[in-house]
Each structure stands twice: as structure tokens, then as C-alpha cells.
């Protein structure tokens, strides 16, 4: 067979939320906000700033936080003390680089 390079990504199971969870539409809206911020070169965004940039009039901080946690679970965003950033690289150059094989 041919040479294959594999990348293993561990995804944690979702945590149990108290109260209602964010809708898929809300998660997608937050994803778009974070992708646009990354494309413009904005730095990390706070939960409050993400909420302000959403098209909805007002989204609760807990809803934004739960949606960000879901995106983080799939390694699409990074969350630190300075805020949240989109980190998934979709540029073709990134995926064309040679990879180190897993041991």
C-alpha cells in the first residue's frame, strides 16, 4: 500500500449544560463572527464583544460561552485570558506541507 500520514484529533464528549443550550444557528453565527475577526486580523475577542457583533439584538453571555466551548471542543477556536480566536487553518498552503508520521 502507499505511504499515508494520519493525524489523530481527540474530541472530548460534550459536557452537560444547566439550562437551555445554544441552538445550532447561534453556534454558526458565533463561528462566522470569529472567522471574520480572524480574516481581518483582529485579536482575541471577549465574550461581550462576540455578543455585540452578533446580528441578534442580545445574546446571553452564558449562551455565547457555551457556543464557544462547543467550538473549542472541536479544536476550532482557542480561548485564553485575552479572549477567543478562530484557529482552524483553511489555507491550502497549510494542508499541503509535509507531515511527520505518527509513531
Image: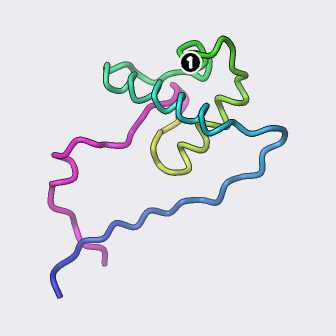
Residue drawn at (40%, 67%), measured in percent from left and top?
8
Dot 1: what SS? loop
> What residue is at 36 percent from the left and 26 percent from the top?
38
14 in relation to 21, above or below: below
Q: Locate the C terminus and report the quarter of the image it occupies.
A: bottom left
Q: Position of residue 96 (x, y in %)?
A: 15, 54
Return the residue found at the far front.
Answer: 25
Along the line of sight, which residue is nearer the eye, 26 or 42? 26
Q: Is residue 12 left or right of residue 97?
A: right
Region of the chain picked out in magenta, as a range: 80-103
Identify which residue is drawn at 55% across, 29% down.
81
Q: Is residue 5 above or below residue 26?
A: below
Identify the residue at image location x=17%, y=79%: 3
Depth order, front residue of 24/69: 24
Q: Is residue 92 left or right of residue 31?
A: left
Label 1 crowd bin: few (<14), some (14–19), many (20+), radius 10 Å: some
Residue 90 picture location, percent across and down: 29, 43
Here the colouring is: rainbow
**Residue 87 at x, y = what percent?**
39, 39
Q: How many marks?
A: 1
Q: Position of residue 4 (x, y in %)?
A: 22, 76
For the N terminus, the quadrant is: bottom left
Quadrant assignment, res 47: top right
Is 62 included in the stretch rendered in magenta? Answer: no
Q: Residue furthest right?
A: 19
Residue 96 located within the stretch drawn in magenta: yes
The reply, left or right, for residue 99 in relation to residue 37 is left
- Residue position for label 1: 54
Amino acid at each position: 500500500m502507499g505511504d499515508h500520514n494520519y493525524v489523530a484529533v481527540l474530541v472530548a464528549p460534550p459536557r452537560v449544560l444547566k439550562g437551555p443550550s445554544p441552538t445550532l444557528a447561534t453556534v454558526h453565527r458565533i463561528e462566522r463572527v470569529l472567522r471574520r475577526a480572524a480574516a481581518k486580523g483582529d485579536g482575541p475577542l471577549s465574550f461581550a464583544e462576540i455578543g455585540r457583533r452578533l446580528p441578534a439584538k442580545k445574546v446571553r453571555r452564558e449562551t455565547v460561552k457555551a457556543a464557544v466551548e462547543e467550538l473549542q471542543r472541536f479544536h476550532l477556536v482557542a480561548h485564553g485570558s485575552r479572549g477567543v480566536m478562530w484557529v482552524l487553518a483553511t489555507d491550502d498552503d497549510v494542508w499541503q506541507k509535509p507531515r511527520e508520521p505518527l509513531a
